[in-house]
Image (cartoon, rainbow, N blue to C red):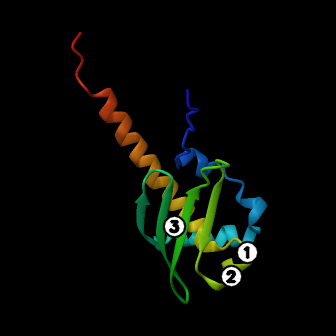
Amino acid sequence: MDAVQLMSILTSKAIKDFPFAYYADAKTIQRGRVYFKEGRVWNIDMHGNSRAICDVEGSNGDYTVEVGINQKTGQLYFECDCPYAENYFCKHMVAAALELSEYLKNEEETNETKTTTRTSKW
């Protein structure tokens, strides 16, 4: 029998539990939270259930952030095309993660509601 590999999926909990403080300094996290609260993440494009592309309005233009789950390790990864992200975890990644977490939470709640409102034969 072949071994079945379970695919990891993005969930609001996985993002909420991510140790941002390990990768970014307090100022970057705070600035990312401000960007999130200001609604600067204006697009989320899901690619399956393990990767999302988010567009973030930065102070010097728009940036694209990818958030995903590494299928081999099950760990979250973040990529941004801003210059700062070449060497550091950036505020756009924080903002995108917060918005994506809210988006996924809403999706999970919607799916949960659909499941519980199905009529039963019994």
Q: For the point 67% across and 52% down, which residue is it?
A: 18
Q: For the point 78% across and 60% down, which residue is it?
A: 22
Q: Closest to the observer: 115 or 9?
A: 9
Residue 37 numbered mark, or none: 3
Identified by mark 3, the residue type is: Lys
Residue 46 numbered mark, or none: none
SS assignment at label 2: helix
Q: Position of residue 39 (x, y in %)?
A: 46, 70
Residue at label 1? 88
Does label 3 or label 1 sit earlier along the sequence? 3
Contact flag, marks 1 and 2 (Cβ < 8 Å)? yes
Identified by mark 2, the residue type is: Tyr
Q: For the point 48% across and 54% down, which residue is it?
A: 102
Q: Residues within 10 Å of mark 2 (few under 14, many from 20)?
A: few
Q: For the point 39% across and 47% down, which residue is it?
A: 107
Residue at label 2? 84
Given this view, does label 3 or label 1 mark the residue nearer the observer? 1
Q: Position of residue 116 (x, y in %)?
A: 33, 27
SS assignment at label 3: helix
Disc 3 versus disc 1: distance between alpha carbons? 22 Å
SS assignment at label 1: loop
Answer left or right for 14 relative to 61: right
